Amino acid sequence: MDALELLQTRLSSPSLAGPGPTEAQLEAMLRAALRAPDHCCLKPYRFLSIEGGRRVELGELFLEATLSDEPDLIEARREKVLAMPLRAPLVLVVIATLCEHPKVPAVEQRVTAGCAAHALELAAAAQGLGAMWRTGSLAYHPRVKAGLGLGSDEEIIGFLYLGTPANSSKKLPQEDPAAKLDVWQGAER
């Protein structure tokens, strides 16, 4: 598959199984992430790898955070929250590491971190792996941030679930690119 085909056909994989990425595959993905567009080469991101039994601990952290907001959570929802990190053999937490910079506002740094996450997804797909980028309220929860050891200058961009696609990918309809392209006619003066 060439690069253009990959960019035009990449899909999220919500059902993932083992095996997860090999060490070499993960390194290739991280190398791709390091090439994200980056004003002033700040590299305003880092990645936290969670696999094996640590995924169970992440589920417990997710439940703790959820219970702090919803103490009367029903048992079925508790079990669902606990199982969230078990949806894939590897969870990469994509973290924006923001800094004060005279030329690069925080919004640009967040976009760079998002581009790094997308590069990880594309590199996973290029290697036959599946990926699913998830956020949700837990990505922004202060207890999750603290439990993962994030600093006050850091934000979770997303949880990237990685593994082997458990079923065939659905086909998305072809979109018309022209529907998203406007042509500026200039300012009326």
Image: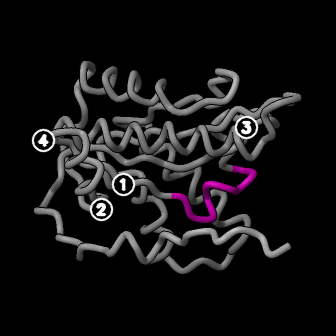
Question: Of the residues under marks 4 and 3, which one precedes in the sequence?
Answer: 4
Question: Of the residues under marks 4 and 2, which one precedes in the sequence?
Answer: 4
Q: CA distance from mark 4 to mark 2?
A: 22 Å
Asked if 75 appears above or below 93 in the picture, the reply is: below
Q: Amino acid at mark 3?
A: Glu
Q: Secondary structure at mark 2?
A: loop
Q: CA distance from mark 1 to mark 2?
A: 6 Å
Left/right of residue 26 with respect to residue 63 in the rendered view: left
Q: Are marks 4 and 3 in contact (CB under 8 Å)?
A: no
Q: CA distance from mark 3 to mark 1?
A: 22 Å
Q: Which residue is mark 3?
A: 154
Quadrant housing residue 153: top right
Is residue 150 within the magenta segment? no
- Mark in the foreground, 4 or 3: 4
Question: Of the residues under marks 3 and 1, which one precedes in the sequence?
Answer: 1
What residue is at 61 percent from the left and 54 percent from the top?
139
Q: How many marks?
A: 4
Q: Which residue is mark 2?
A: 14
The quarter of the image holding the N terminus is top left
Q: CA distance from mark 3 to mark 2?
A: 26 Å
Region of the chain picked out in magenta, as a range: 135-143
Left/right of residue 68 with respect to residue 172 in the rendered view: right
Foreground pick, 129 / 68: 129
Q: Which residue is mark 1?
A: 132
Q: Amino acid at mark 2?
A: Pro
Question: Of the residues under marks 1 and 2, which one precedes in the sequence?
Answer: 2
Q: Which residue is mark 4?
A: 1
Q: Are marks 1 and 2 in contact (CB under 8 Å)?
A: yes
Residue 35 disc label: none
Dominant secondary structure, magenta? helix
